[in-house]
Image (tube, rainbow, N blue to C red):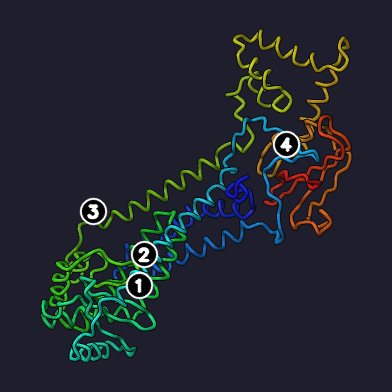
């Protein structure tokens, strides 16, 4: 068994898969709530706080859901959803359904895919941070003394008391801010000679506003959260809103300090010609949609279609999630087939004798063309297994259907999975009642010489099973506490 297969069989992988599934509707609700706030609020500061709150709510919801879905046991747990084996290593049960998986069985496979995605996004974020560090350490020279003094006066004008360094850089083409504890502003080499003093001061005020608001730190935390929640498009929309409104907030601080919105808008327009691809770990004056920022400053309304597009996209996502949830809730419970669509012969093959029919018999039955042929096959099937041929009663057939009825009555799960489909039901139908049962419906007890798990479990002992050997013990655990006990490995291995 590979490391990946071992991992997806752990309770953590299943809990993580369920959490990822729940996060779809959680993030959709958060995004739709944010869209409603954006539709009625115009203040960039409130919009920014609302977007940050939406992202935090998705992250907190993800963590809380993971805790709620996590198994209660704290010690080592045997892998689940595997067939037990006897002491001689022979398989105890075969899968009568040809290895088919239920939807719940596929959930744990979401976990390794998500972890790989998180690793990829965090590596990308780390690369952006390293690139920003390189900008801070390479190709720098101090800005002229008069500009450093001017930067101090600009910082004091907006109430910023932290020390900020000003450098010219040969590696960047737009002004950017890097660092939280020791922030620096990098100006492209030569820009001090290319733009008017008033426009440069406006741009510096924008960068100082980011430092005053601690936006660099928030941006790093936001990037980390994006990596964790990369799987949901609503999260990326929320994150984009945060970045846009962050720039709007800095614009408002700079415009208020400049005193002339038109001059500040002209400074942003000049930066459009210097625009280049930004760095994830740096804050640039050209961040966000530059033309959108300019239109907002001069009070030019955006095209209505553009303003409605994000809300429409989120609404459609939310509707799709609700539709999927509705279909899941209204579908027949697991293990319950639509009887009207299943013929008696198909039911006989896939339910009545699913565990006892041999593969060659299954193939032969599936190749039959007429109902009389199928009736004759079924009659011969039971005759071949009759321990007392010639008597009125077929004891094997009667006992088999009695076991099915008992399994459905005794082992049906709370979720509606019919008893004959459960692991305990399958064992009972194949081998009959065990010789001994150790049951702990509340957990605890003694398992393998140690305190048993906190969730319900059972151990069935068969003194002898033909072709299996003696003293075959089968374990079942209800880790989800839904009444569906799942089989684990033979503890005698």
Instruction: Give the residue displayed 79% in from the left and 56% down from the top.
Output: 452
Q: Give the labeled residue for mark 2.
A: 37
Find residue 319 and report its horizontal and vertical position in percent.
42, 47
> Left or right: where does residue 83 sit relative to residue 462?
left
Cα gap from disc 2 to disc 4, whole angstroms: 49 Å
SS label for mark 3: helix
Q: Position of residue 483 (x, y in %)?
A: 72, 46
- Spatial CA distance of label 1 from label 3 is 23 Å
The answer to which of marks 2 and 4 sits earlier in the sequence is 2
According to the picture, the residue beneath numbered tag 1 turns out to be 46
Q: Give the CA distance from mark 1 to mark 2.
A: 9 Å
Task: Name which quarter of the figure residue 81 lies in.
Answer: top right
- Closer to the N terminus: mark 1 or mark 3? 1
Which is nearer the N-term, disc 3 or disc 2? 2
Q: At 13% from the left edge and 73% from the top edge, which residue is drawn?
A: 266
Q: Which of label 4 and label 1 is nearer to you?
A: 4
Reading the image, the residue beneath label 4 is 419
Q: Is residue 12 left or right of residue 281?
A: right
Q: Which residue is mark 3?
A: 305
> In the figure, residue 264 lies in which quadrant?
bottom left
Q: Quadrant of residue 261?
A: bottom left
Q: Distance of mark 4 from mark 3, alpha carbons? A: 55 Å
Q: Secondary structure at mark 4?
A: helix
């Amino acid at each position: 068994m590979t490391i990946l297969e071992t991992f997806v069989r752990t309770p953590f992988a299943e809990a993580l898969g369920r959490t990822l599934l729940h996060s779809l509707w959680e993030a959709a609700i958060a995004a739709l709530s944010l869209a409603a706030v954006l539709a009625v609020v115009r203040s960039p500061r409130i919009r920014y706080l609302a977007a940050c709150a939406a992202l935090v709510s998705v992250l907190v919801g993800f963590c809380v859901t993971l805790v709620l879905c996590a198994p209660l046991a704290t010690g080592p747990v045997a892998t689940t959803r595997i067939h037990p084996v006897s002491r001689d290593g022979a398989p105890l049960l075969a899968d009568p359904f040809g290895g088919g998986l239920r939807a719940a069985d596929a959930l744990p496979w979401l976990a390794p895919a998500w972890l790989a995605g998180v690793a990829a996004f965090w590596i990308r974020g780390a690369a952006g941070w390293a690139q920003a560090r390189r900008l801070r350490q390479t190709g720098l020279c101090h800005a002229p003394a008069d500009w450093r003094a001017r930067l101090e006066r600009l910082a004091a004008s907006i109430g910023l008391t932290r020390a900020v360094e000003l450098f010219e850089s040969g590696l960047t083409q737009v002004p950017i801010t890097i660092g939280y504890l020791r922030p620096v502003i990098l100006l492209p080499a030569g820009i001090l000679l290319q733009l008017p003093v008033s426009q440069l001061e406006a741009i510096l005020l924008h960068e100082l506003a980011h430092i005053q608001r601690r936006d660099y730190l928030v941006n790093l935390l936001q990037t980390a959260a994006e990596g964790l929640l990369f799987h949901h498009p609503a999260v990326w929309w929320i994150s984009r809103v945060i970045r846009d409104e962050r720039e709007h907030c800095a614009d408002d601080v700079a415009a208020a300090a400049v005193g002339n919105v038109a001059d500040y808008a002209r400074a942003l327009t000049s930066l459009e010609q210097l625009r280049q691809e930004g760095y994830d770990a740096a804050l640039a004056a050209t961040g966000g949609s530059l033309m959108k920022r300019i239109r907002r400053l001069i009070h030019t309304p955006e095209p209505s279609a553009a303003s409605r597009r994000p809300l429409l996209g989120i609404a459609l996502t939310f509707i799709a999630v609700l539709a999927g949830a509705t279909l899941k809730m209204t579908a027949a419970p697991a293990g319950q087939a639509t009887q009207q669509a299943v013929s008696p012969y198909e039911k006989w093959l896939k339910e009545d004798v699913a565990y006892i029919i041999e593969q060659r018999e299954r193939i032969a039955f599936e190749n039959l063309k007429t109902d009389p042929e199928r009736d004759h096959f079924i009659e011969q099937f039971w005759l071949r297994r009759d321990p007392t041929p010639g008597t009125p009663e077929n004891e094997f057939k009667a006992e088999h259907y009695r076991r099915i009825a008992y399994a459905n009555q005794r082992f049906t799960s709370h979720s509606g999975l019919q008893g004959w489909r459960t692991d305990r039901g399958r064992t009972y139908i194949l081998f009959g009642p065990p010789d001994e049962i150790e049951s702990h419906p509340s957990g605890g007890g003694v398992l393998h010489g140690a305190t048993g798990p906190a969730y319900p479990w059972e151990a069935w002992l068969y003194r002898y099973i033909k072709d299996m050997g003696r003293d075959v013990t089968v374990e079942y655990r209800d880790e989800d506490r839904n009444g569906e006990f799942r089989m684990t490995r033979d503890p005698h291995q």
